[in-house]
Image (spheres, rainbow, N blue to C red):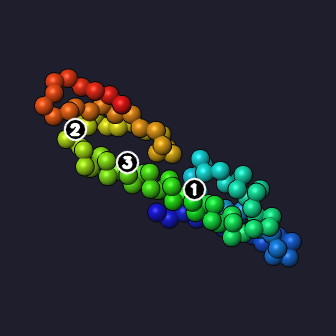
Amino acid sequence: DSFHLELLPAREFREFRIQRHSIPPFIPLERLSREFLPSDLRGFLDALFQHLNAFVGRRQRLQQFQEEFSEWIQGIPRGNSLCNLLSFRFRIPGKSGNSQL
């Protein structure tokens, strides 16, 4: 996945501010920028990378789950944009009836 982040230097290139970005809105970008950008660009980028990597990893695991267990899942799983909450119906082979998580 690709995300766009454009930083502008401020105060003689010692601080940065966010100009534009394509970071998902649930990533705490404002908090990270207040905490790190005044003095620690590397810390900001590291923390942002961790948030984005966790999100992309959860989304990929959801896709793998849907592919691997598609014969057991009934309908389309529902989840939130952060991919940390998932609701779906499934059936267990050899058992009658449905279960839900």
User: Which residue is situated farthest in the top direction here?
Assistant: 97
Is 67 placed above or below 52 here? above
Real-space Cα separation, disc 1 to disc 3, in angstroms: 17 Å
One can see residue 79 in this view: yes
Q: Earlier in the sequence, mark 1 or mark 3?
A: 1
Q: Which residue is mark 1?
A: 51
Question: Badge 3: few (under 14), some or many (20 or more) residues near its Cα, within 10 Å?
Answer: some
Say which element carries label 3: helix
User: Which residue is situated farthest in the left direction here?
Assistant: 94
Q: Which residue is mark 2?
A: 72
Placement of the C terminus among the 4 image quadrants: top left
Numbered label attached to residue 62: 3
Q: Residue at x 86, y 76 (%)?
A: 12
Where is residue 32? Give x, y as percent.
70, 56
Q: Are marks 2 and 3 in contact (CB under 8 Å)?
A: no
Is 61 placed above or below 46 here? above
Where is residue 54? Give x, y as percent.
51, 55
Is 8 placed above or below 47 here? below
Q: In the depicted view, which residue is nearer to us: 7 or 53?
A: 53
